[in-house]
Image: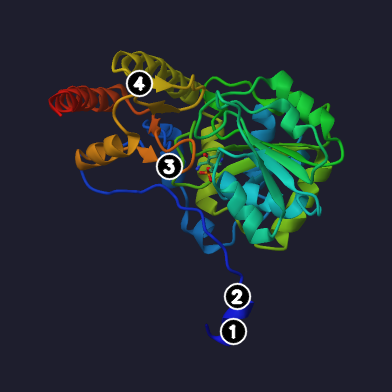
Amino acid sequence: MAAWEANVRKVAPYTPGEQPGGAGVIKLNTNENPYPPAPAVLRALQALGADSLRKYPDPGAGILTEALAVHYGLSKQQVFVGVGSDDVLAMAFLAFFNSAKPILFPDITYSFYDVWAGLYRIPYERQPLDADFCIRTEDYCQECGGVILPNPNAPTGLEKPLSELEEIIKANPDVIVIIDEAYIDFGGESAVSLLPVYENLLVVQTFSKSRSLAGMRIGYAFGHEKLIRYLNDVKYSFNSYTMSAAALAAGTAAIRESSYYKETQQSIIRTRERAKGELRRLGFTFLDSRSNFIFASHPLCPARELFEALKKENIYVRYFPKPRIDNYLRITVGTDEEMEALFHFLERYLEAYAQGQEME
Ligand code: PMP
């Protein structure tokens, strides 16, 4: 090892899902929305003039924070925006998790949390989910440096009732509790309603899932004015211009098109519930997802094998080779046609698999 390497910050990075290109791919592996963004979003992007590209964007992201504040009934001072919720969460870890006590999050959850903790050298403890993959309230009601919980959780898709989250927020008045609501718009109840009561609560959401804008990279956080000020101080110490002119225009247009997005969200919820029926018919067991993905396991056929077989067929789902969940597939809810193609293949594959087993 060269001497300079002793002073390199070494981190174990997050591994994002594959982004396969090409025609004919059915992509159900990164929880993207299968529907296009609202037409007004594309029009807003086309209307961007040369001047808005030539100049630096508004560092305060004024039009977008204003639109979000109006839409959610908050003040502008309660809104922070960033380059996807990953950026918002990373800033929040840096701003709020500076205690010598460990921060708490589940053992099975979004796998970026321990990466940020590692990057910033934040001590952390993973709290095991119970046997049904539920987050246990009591695990988070103890002395700690902060709490981060996704609701619904990923990759389980399970929602924790808001009253239980409130218990956790109430039990931790001396630290910040972050609720990561990346998937809240697919039928969950948001913690935004608790903001007037709890100064220690930060709610983080994204345009990537329910607003079909993963490629534009827009996320946001809501919290007490003081929290947002601290977040902005960190952001301005890092990069003043996180939000491009394109992201500001697209995000603002998307917020104003809530009726379009209500419809696409409802379509996804309907497809998800139908998909649960199909999975049951095929013999899968799965968790009762309130998100845009389903976490499913087959009692006969190993998940890794199904994952590989699907990939050969150009159907991409997500597989995590990790303890407790290495026999599960995380399947993003696509369009009805995409889901039909998936189930059609699974039906044939599982039939052949069962016959093969019988012959052995
Ligand atoms: N939180 C959770 C729980 C997620 O699954 C994701 C998506 N990978 C994110 C945050 C980040 O999403 P984005 O940066 O696209 O907003």
Contact between marks 2 and 4 (CB within 8 A): the answer is no
Q: Which mark is residue 8?
A: 2
* Mark 2 to mark 1 CA distance (whole Å): 7 Å
Which numbered disc covers residue 199? none
* Viewer-proximal residue among 329 and 22: 329
What is the CA distance from the residue labelled 3 to the residue labelled 2?
Answer: 29 Å
> Which residue is drawn at the image coordinates 32% and 26% (left, top)?
335
Circle 4 or circle 1, nearest the eye: 4
The residue lying furthest to the left in this view is 359
- The answer to whether residue 240 shows anywhere in this view is no
Evaluate if marks 2 and 1 touch, with contact meaning CB atoms under 8 Å apart: yes
Q: Is residue 101 left or right of residue 4?
A: right
Local crowd size for mark 4, using a 10 Å CA cut-off: few (<14), some (14–19), many (≥20): some
Residue 180 horizontal side relative to residue 103, left or right? left
Residue to which mark 4 is pinned: 284
Residue at the (64%, 47%) spot, across then down: 89
Closer-to-camera residue (67/117): 117
Circle 2 crowding by C-alpha within 10 Å: few under 14, some 14–19, many from 20: few
Of tags 3 and 2, which is closer to the observer? 3
What residue is pinned by disc 3? Answer: 320
Discs 2/4, front: 4
Secondary structure of the residue carrying tag 2 is loop
Name the residue type under label 4. Phe
Which residue is the site of mark 1? 4
Helix or strand or loop: what does disc 3 sit on?
loop
Residue 346 placement: quadrant: top left
Crowd tier of the residue under label 3, counting other residues whose Cα lies within 10 Å: few below 14, some 14–19, many 20 or above: some
